[in-house]
Amino acid sequence: MPLFVIERTVNTNVVHYDAKLKDGKLDPQQPVVAYWVMGENGHHQELNLLEKLKAYGFSIHPDKQPENFHMFLVSDKKKEIRVLRVGDAVRAEAKIGSCEAYLQKIIIASKKSWLVSLPEYAEMVGSDMSTGVECRERVTPADR
């Protein structure tokens, strides 16, 4: 069940974060899975160890409420993403700017420098939970 994606400006490959269900509920052992969808052919691919440790991996911990979890991406350990069941849906919620929002995507803008991509900023995009209006928040590496 899709939660949100991370898009990058360097290519069309996208990291997908999906809720994993077991017996109709969020799997308590692995409530979220992350994987690449390669832009050129749509092929799915696992994140490698370096990607999990440095960029796109995450930690996730259960809340006191059943089927609620607190998720933190390794690239921004300060920004909490709440993963929870809402009726038949599973949502990723986060504070985006001044909004409490449903997280839809994170855009990572990078520039090429020699053989590496250096991040310029990350922009979180979602919809306000009460109004549905789009919310955006941009942070640079210096902000964190």
Image: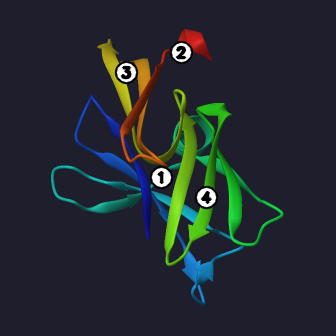
Residue 85, image x, y percentages = 59, 69
The number of numbered discs placed on residues in the rendered structure image is 4
Asked which secondary structure carries label 3, the reply is strand
Q: Amino acid at mark 1?
A: Leu
Instruction: Locate residue 72: give its quadrant.
Output: top right
Amino acid on which the number 4 mark rests in the picture: Val
Q: Amino acid at mark 3?
A: Ser
The residue where tag 3 is placed is 117
Q: Is residue 127 left or right of residue 53?
A: left
For the residues marked 2 and 1, what is the alpha-carbon distance in whole angstroms? Answer: 22 Å
Q: Nearer the viewer, residue 16 or 63?
A: 63
Q: Which residue is mark 2?
A: 141
Left or right side of 140 for 37: left
Mark closest to the chain's N terminus, 4 or 2: 4
Choose the circle earlier in sequence order: 3 or 4: 4
- Residue 47 shows which numbered tag? 1
Q: Which residue is mark 4?
A: 83
Residue at screen point 37% across, 21% down: 117
Which circle's residue, 1 or 3, is located before the other in the chain?
Answer: 1
Q: Give the x, y percent position of residue 74.
A: 63, 38
Few, some or many residues within 10 Å of mark 2 (<14, 14–19, 20+): few
